[in-house]
Image: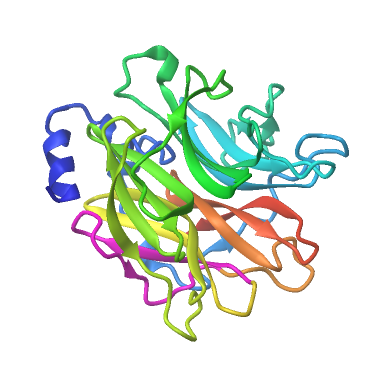
Amino acid sequence: MPLLKKWQLDKHEDDSDIHHREWGWADEQGWLKSIILPLTEQNGWTRYANNPILQKGASGAWDDKYVEHPCVIRLNGIYYMFYAGRKVSDEIEKIGLAQSTDPYGQSPVFSKHASNPIISPTGTEDRAMMPSVIYDHHETDLNKKWKAWICHHETAPAGYSTKFYTAPNPEGTWTLQGACTGLTAYQYCNSVMRLGLMYFMLYVDTDFNVRSAISSDGLAWNSYGVVLSHGGAGEWDDLADAYLSVFWNLGVWYIIYGGAPVGVAHFQIGMATNTDGWSTFTKFFRNPVYSYGGAGAWDEKHVNFPSLLMFEDKFLMYYSGCNNSNVYAIGLATIP
């Protein structure tokens, strides 16, 4: 059964309106808004003047090397930012939480939670990163309302996997439910949302293309093949399409993602759309829609791993930025 048809059947089993925002990081009025992203251009996004909005911790902190990979959720007027942080002394990457009642993270600033890190690698793993988190309105078990899919890196033997966690609150305690299965040619990076009674995932495969998958429980997945391929020779993303987020609104599916060319280690951000339920996505003809900063900027080398949020009449894009010293921080851009 095509993915969109399956979702439509599930949708009508629930006559409430909450399914319109169950991907978890678009605000509750998302269904009422007109999509403005197709109008974006290279200069369509405005860098927030107070960037970066979240930076590495003080010396000795668990995230004192850098912070990256934001996933932002709005719930009951609070903005929860899940992110990855790395420590200088051991190079271990873990998941943290910051929150604010201001989507711009200024009044007040995004405050890192006292219980950080909230998810850590185990055994011979050295990285827990790239969080994809939702608040699941359909879940009846109050201890599993929050759901997270985290990319883990194993050192012996080297490789990546996605692990599924649940929690009663955003700060945890987060309980590991297991490693996800059925993800064909899995490399890393996933973005998960829920529409109706199904979970949908996009992830990056070993050829650095994007694949789709569907699940009824968030743990066992059926992969449906490549939906977005990296660019052809000479294009801006001919090395990889990765570091992505996905959402659905008004009958259109959107991917916003990081792409990079062969031979030049500069990630930029592009967008692709689809209207028929996760077959092949069409890349926006003005890609990349957002580029790295100028010389000396905090994001002068890379911009990637975007996370989108709708707020009032704007789209907010939280993203990882990196300077030429390879220090990552998290910034914000807006449109219009």
| Residue at (48% x, 77% y) in the render | 238
Q: Position of residue 226 (x, y in %)?
A: 32, 62
Query: Which residue appears farthest toward the right when viewing the image?
Result: 59
Horizontal side, residue 7 vs residue 20: left or right: left
Q: Position of residue 130 (x, y in %)?
A: 55, 45
Q: Could you tell me how many numbered marks the image carries? A: 0
270 drawn magenta: yes
Residue 232 quadrant: bottom left
101 drawn magenta: no
Question: Is residue 302 in sight in this rendering?
Answer: yes
Horizontal side, residue 177 vs residue 138: left or right: right
Q: Position of residue 293 (x, y in %)?
A: 67, 68
Asked whether 184 or 249 is in front, the reply is: 184
Q: Main secondary structure of the magenta part?
A: loop
Query: Which residue appears farthest toward the bottom when viewing the image?
Result: 234
| Residue at (33% x, 24% y) in the render | 137
Q: Position of residue 189 (x, y in %)?
A: 49, 50
Above or below residue 20? Residue 50 is: below
| Residue at (70% x, 31% y) in the render | 112
Asked whether 37 or 184 is in front, the reply is: 184
Give the image's coloring scheme. rainbow
Question: Is residue 108 in sight in this rendering?
Answer: no
Range drawn in magenta: 266-290
Above or below residue 29? Residue 244 is: below
